[in-house]
Amino acid sequence: MRHATLYAVISVLGLPIFAAESKPPKPCTIKSPSTGDFYDLNAITVHPLKDHKKAHKDDRTESWHSRGYDYGTNFTINFCAPVIEKMEDVVGVDEALWPNVSAFYTLKGKKYSIGQASAEPIFRGRKLVLNYTDGSPCDDRKTLRRAPRREKEERDDDEEEDDEGDKRKHEDDDTDDERADKKKSTDESKRRRKSTLLSLTCDRESLAAKAHVSFIGASPDECTYFFEVKSIAACGGVIQDTQQTLGPGGVFGVT
């Protein structure tokens, strides 16, 4: 009642009413627009050990891993931060961006990025999602993992094309050179690049800050990779003024 009276007096006097300033959200955190729950994924971010620091039994010394099973390769992923493994010779990615790769796989001895680090989770409906973009080029046939039968069919097609092409080789030499020059001048920023979509779901079975990452599949052109992540970090909690989060279990202890 007193608050209502105070606001009425301020309104009559024409004084402005200022709302309390809200602090900008921490990286890798988000508030659900539908439930108001607060999510902090920093708990499952793997950080490299500082120099001269001895690893404790609970410290992770490598990023999270996911088996590809029939896909033919496994994946290495971190959350909201680059992987802590040393990245070198990443296919189709500028050297300056190698330290910012947040998900990758190795195929035939070569490393392929499937996304740069992002610390901005989003809600798509009720689904908590983290998206990495700007990985290795996905329009390069060498980056595709193909089934043997599919590779044979394409080799047969290529051989037929080569036979026809040999007949016109001398006639088209000048044209080929011009096309090659045009291809080299193509803007690299327009190339389609690999990306990762992580769907995070609540897992209360483990109270520790762990993540179980399951590979769901890839798009037919192997340009987008889908993963499901189960973790207690995706269960949400209530936010305090200090931006510390009370987990689902801690809410019941608040009086």
Image: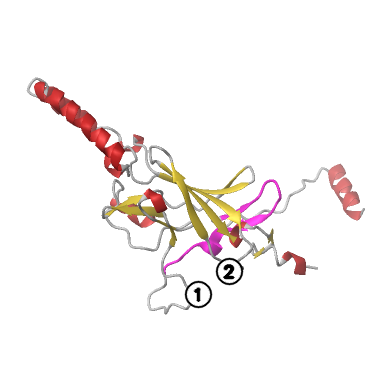
Query: Which residue shows up at 26% across the image and 33% down it?
Result: 154
Specify the amino acid type for callout 1. Answer: Asp
Q: Quadrant of the C terminus?
A: bottom right
Front one among 64 and 247: 64
Query: Which residue shows up at 27% across the image and 42% down it?
Result: 142
Left or right: where does residue 128 sit relative to residue 49?
A: right
Query: Which residue shows up at 48% across the image and 78% down it?
Result: 57
| Image marks 1 and 2: residues in contact by CB distance under 8 Å | yes
Task: Locate residue 214, reporting x and y percent.
Answer: 49, 54
> If you read the primary sequence from the N terminus, does the residue marked by circle 1 or circle 2 appear first?
1
Label of residue 208 in the image:
2
Compared to residue 106, the image places residue 149 above or below, namely: above
Scheme by which the image is coloured: secondary structure
Left or right: where does residue 248 sit relative to residue 228?
A: right
Specify the amino acid type for callout 2. Answer: Ala
Q: CA distance from mark 1 to mark 2?
A: 10 Å
Compared to residue 210, the image places residue 144 above or below, namely: above
Residue 166 visible to the viewer: yes
Label of residue 58 in the image:
1
Residue farthest left in this picture: 170
Magenta stretch containing residue 31, yes or no?
yes
Q: Which residues are magenta?
A: 29-48
